[in-house]
Amino acid sequence: MRIDSTPVRPGPRRNRRLVAVALTVLAMTASGCAKDGGAGADGDTVRIGMIVAETGPIAGAGKTFANGARIAAAQVNADDLMDNGKKIELVAKEGSEDPAKSASVAAQLAADKSIVGITCCILSTVAGAAKPIAEKQKVPLMLWGATDVDLADPPYVFRTVTMPQPANEKVSQTVAEQTGIKSVAYGVMTDNSGIVSQAEAFVSGMNDAGVQDLGTVETLSTTTNFTSAATDLIQKDSDAIVVAGTQSNAVGLIAALHDKGYDGQVITGETISGSGVFKSQPDALASVPFPVYFLSDQPANDAAKAFVEAYTKEYGEAPDGYAAQGYNAIYTLAMGLKAAGDDTTRAGLSKALDGMTELKDTIYGDVTFDGGQLNATSAVQIVNYTAPDGDIAAWKPAN
């Protein structure tokens, strides 16, 4: 039987207390023995393992994921969002987004029976390494990133990352309809299955809009010189070029297209968002449309506004989309624990998350769950960087 879990954030009480949320960095080490799979040392504290990537090749994104999660835990505890004084204790361990290292950390956390759930994973390869451990140890795993298809797999693996595929379909359809483009070519990083899946969503959106597909030029994650790929794409003489890649790959190809003088419409995915990205290639990135689910200066509701305020106060900068994903992973786990009632075991949390069909008033607005995957398509916004400062604003077609 599925449980319709629709917890709603408290209003005035929550907002009053958010002002006072000085992020008490939660104790990151074990403080005592606990029941098998149950609550933590004092019986009212539930321990959640967090595999972070605050070092390594994607530490920039990794830190914001983790910081967003810490803000969520602080708010859940300060505002008693799980009711009856129940609190979350985050147990963070560094995985550096390395599959082998992260799998080892996942095994350590899973072996600790006081850990009720685990959250992690930006890259699909890392999520793929952690997933079988969670399933074998029967510990709920909440993926805050990793966009490859079929990773969510209840009753033990869930995913709160807002998936780029529906956002990419929407940006393709929107740009096609508003610019009147008739043909498109694709530059795709093909040695990453998650990126390939994202590219397929762009293609689906363009096909639905009746735009002719003139073909794909492949790049690889190891590509550093994009001149040849840009030349091949421009020779296809399409009205638009869609670029699908990880952040450095996408920015590199877009910059090469700009340097080669391509004057058609360039479209890309959310991977180009993030602190400092615009400044790396301001002329190339300005006015390129991409989708986002979360914008700190355009919060969807009071919950998002409170998150932005707390994050900015704690870290001195506004949260980006990665921070929002980290936040939402912990918030969703907390709402699962609330729905589990007194059964704050791994089994109780797993059952509650598996039965979760929707959540009201998240930082993305109301969201739904299907097969363990969060859906928030209504929150998608089509935006672009604006020159000269790189502010992100709603995208409008050029005159």
Image (tube, rainbow, N blue to C red):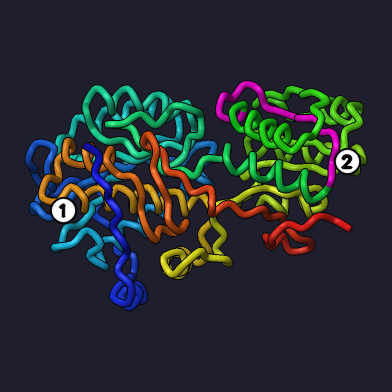
Q: Nearer the viewer, residue 235 or 183?
A: 183
1 or 2: tag closer to the N-terminus: 1
Q: Is residue 53 visible?
A: yes
Q: Quadrant of the C terminus?
A: bottom right
Q: Amino acid at mark 1?
A: Thr
Residue 259, disc: 2
Q: Is residue 188 magenta?
A: yes
Where is residue 193 shown, x and y percent of the image?
A: 57, 24
Q: Quadrant of residue 171?
A: top right
Q: Say which residue appears at 77% left-offset and 43% top-offset.
A: 176
Q: Is residue 271 visible?
A: no
Please give left or right for residue 224 compared with residue 358 in the image. Answer: right
Identify the residue under disc 1: 45
Task: For marks 1 and 2, give the CA distance.
Answer: 55 Å
SS under mark 1: strand
- Within 10 angstroms of label 1, few (less than 14), some, or many (20 or more) residues? some
Q: Which residues are magenta?
A: 180-195
